[in-house]
Image (cartoon, grey):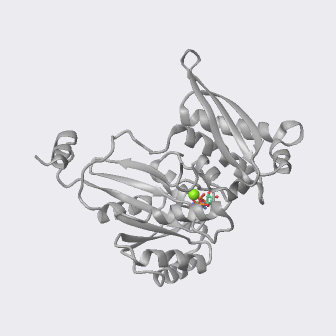
Amino acid sequence: MDLDYLLHTDLTNEPEDFKSGFVTLIGRPNAGKSTLLNAIMGQKIAITSDTAQTTRHRFRAVLTKDDFQVVIIDTPGLHRPHDVLGEELNTSALKALEDVDVVAMLIDASAEVGKGDIWVAEQLGRLSAKKICVLSKVDLVSAEQLEKQRLAAEKLCTWDAMVGLSSVTGKNLDAFIEEVVYLLPQGPKWFPDDMQTDQPIEVIVAEFIREKILRTFTDEVPHAIGVQVEEMQYVRKKDLYRIYAIVYVERDSQKGIIIGKHGASLKRIGTEARLDLEQLLGCKVFLDLRVKVKKNWRRDANQIRRFGYGEGA
Ligand SMILES: Nc1nc2c(ncn2[C@@H]2O[C@H](COP(=O)(O)OP(=O)(O)OP(=O)(O)O)[C@@H](O)[C@H]2O)c(=O)[nH]1
Ligand SMILES: [Mg+2]
């Protein structure tokens, strides 16, 4: 008997018309992709910030309901690269367009449609996937502005659907999911009901720490940091996680900035990260944060992969 058939019939018992598939969120940096992913999942799993290129991992989250299972792929924002890291991030995002059922391109309703959006839309032309245009952050614009944006977006590509939504107010989130599910093929449940993401917990923890740094500093510092979790231990007796992590920077001067006067900045970052991590892990957290210099790591493809950014190790 066909093995696929066996797997399908023995391990799952979803209804005949169950739908499943992959949807990739794509767009310029800051368009709101990761915020949308979190809003859909009803929980913060991806980090977000005002800093462009917040996301450095292709990140898969699984949303399972009675009649569908959709794997949502968050990607780094597509941009004009300035270094090897930027190139790796773009490659990783473009790769996430391959072999998916639906591509949702996010366009920030509150920002002018520009060359960057035109370039992203051009990447979609050759794909056989269904295409949804998402006008994001509609809470920030008037009805007239939204209409103007809709007309500009319509010209970019032949869309199968268009939706204006807000991940902050929740407006049209359900409509977006419904549209995605409508465009998905019928198929089996590929992942267990309780699986939410494919990322190892160490990666999510490192990202949560990086988010606090992105939100604390401006300019070049956020781009120059990489975070790695060295060790994570659960102490059952105390219901506590001990986490040892290192913040890498490119120069000594950046190390000084991250640590701050008498260690004040690092302490604040540590406290904010710890509170978020306690929520994520559902227990107390002891966080040991250290800062180290790794000269010019953003130009070193091997080091970028060691961090797991872009395509990962
Ligand atoms: N008002 C409003 N702000 C939003 C909305 N969605 C996202 N944002 C904000 O926009 C900024 C960028 O959001 P992200 O989700 O990090 O954007 P991204 O597309 O993942 O960015 P990269 O990872 O850099 O590509 C953050 O400050 C979010 O809080 C929304 O629906 N409404
Ligand atoms: Mg992001």
Asked if 142 appears above or below 298 in the picture, the reply is below
Q: Looking at the image, which residue is at 33% across and 40% down?
A: 192
- Left/right placement of residue 50 relative to residue 71 reads right
Q: Looking at the image, which residue is at 58% across and 52% down?
A: 309
Quadrant in which ligand 2 is drawn? bottom right
Q: Return the residue nearer the eye: 240 or 120.
A: 120
Question: Which image quarter: residue 242?
Answer: top right
- Left/right placement of residue 292 relative to residue 191 reads right
Q: Looking at the image, which residue is at 63% across and 37% down?
A: 229
How far across and how far down the image is residue 14, in percent?
21, 46
Question: Which image quarter: residue 87?
Answer: bottom right
Furthest residue in direction right, as rendered: 261
Q: Is residue 114 visible from the viewing direction of this image? A: no
- Left/right placement of residue 5 relative to residue 218 reads left
How far across and how far down the image is residue 102, in percent?
37, 65
Furthest residue in direction left, as rendered: 1
Q: Looking at the image, which residue is at 85% across and 45% down?
A: 256
Furthest residue in direction top, as rendered: 237
Q: Is residue 196 visible from the viewing direction of this image? A: yes
State how many labels appear. 0
How far across and how far down the image is residue 20, in percent?
29, 55
Question: Which image quarter: residue 287?
Answer: top right
